[in-house]
Amino acid sequence: MPRKSRFYIAGLPVHVVQRGNNRAPIFFDESDYRAYLKWLKDAAKKYCCVIHAYVLMTNHVHLLLTPEDEMGVSRMMQYLGRYYVPYINHTYGRTGTLWEGRYKSSLVDADGYFLMCSRYIELNPVRASMVSHPREYAWSSYAANAEGKVDVLVKPHYLYTSLGTNDEERQQAYQALFRVHIDDAELSGIRASWQTGTPLGNDKFREEIEGILGKEIGQSRRGRPSKGL
């Protein structure tokens, strides 16, 4: 069966998810998280991808980013694989694949879904019962977006900057978003989008994307989306 093609549009946000093979760990020590973030920063700069939100979980990662061209996401992820996988194999004396197949991704309707997707990503450690609040998890963009911690990897999206007239107002407004529950239907919609490659947005957004690309993309996913991501 041929691989499903991926489609990206310059300037349009993308939610990227990559998991460990058979859900096995991809990070084993704090140094691994730091190494991944270093190569992610290098790759994002090299291939002109702007990172807005991220979380590094034990066995998978989530990224919310905007590419400046159609090839940026693919090239960035290839770069990460070329450096991070050999690093892990060499460090821990292992061989073989690290990732569970290819990474998954979905285009994101910025106006309607960007901030919800950012919250979804940064709340992963809470949903996994690893922490009680996202500020307690060290390997995510929450501290940068919500508390103003310097993170050279994170660059604000225009929807984030529109939350206030200065950094303090934006951070307070962003924190307030986390007091609003993401309901089960919204969680299922986000998961189904990245699992199938279907654009995350309403029907009009999906039709607009298909009109730009000249073809249908993604598909409806049968059954219940997997939990914990």
Image (cartoon, rainbow, N blue to C red):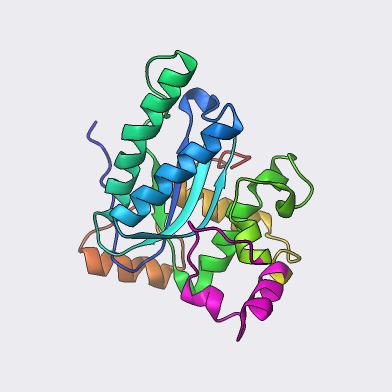
Q: Residue furthest right?
A: 132
Residue situated in front as seen by the camera: 204 or 52 = 52
Residue 59 appears in the rendering: no
For the point 63% across and 40% down, which residue is it?
228
Residue situated in front as seen by the camera: 68 or 35 = 35
Q: Is residue 113 left or right of residue 65?
A: right
Percent position of residue 85, x then y: 39, 28
For the point 66% across and 65% down, which residue is it?
146
Residue situated in front as seen by the camera: 105 or 216 = 105
Residue 127 versus residue 157 in the image, above or below: above
Question: Within the magenta stretch, is there residue 154?
Answer: yes
For the point 57% across and 48% down, which residue is it?
55
Percent position of residue 83, x then y: 35, 33
Residue situated in front as seen by the camera: 116 or 44 = 44
Question: Within the magenta stretch, is there residue 129?
Answer: no
Highlighted range, magenta: 148-175
Q: Residue furthest bottom?
A: 165
Q: Is residue 176 left or right of residue 93?
A: right
Rendered-image quadrant of the C terminus = top right
The quadrant holding residue 82 is top left
Residue 105 appears in the rendering: yes
Percent position of residue 191, x then y: 53, 49
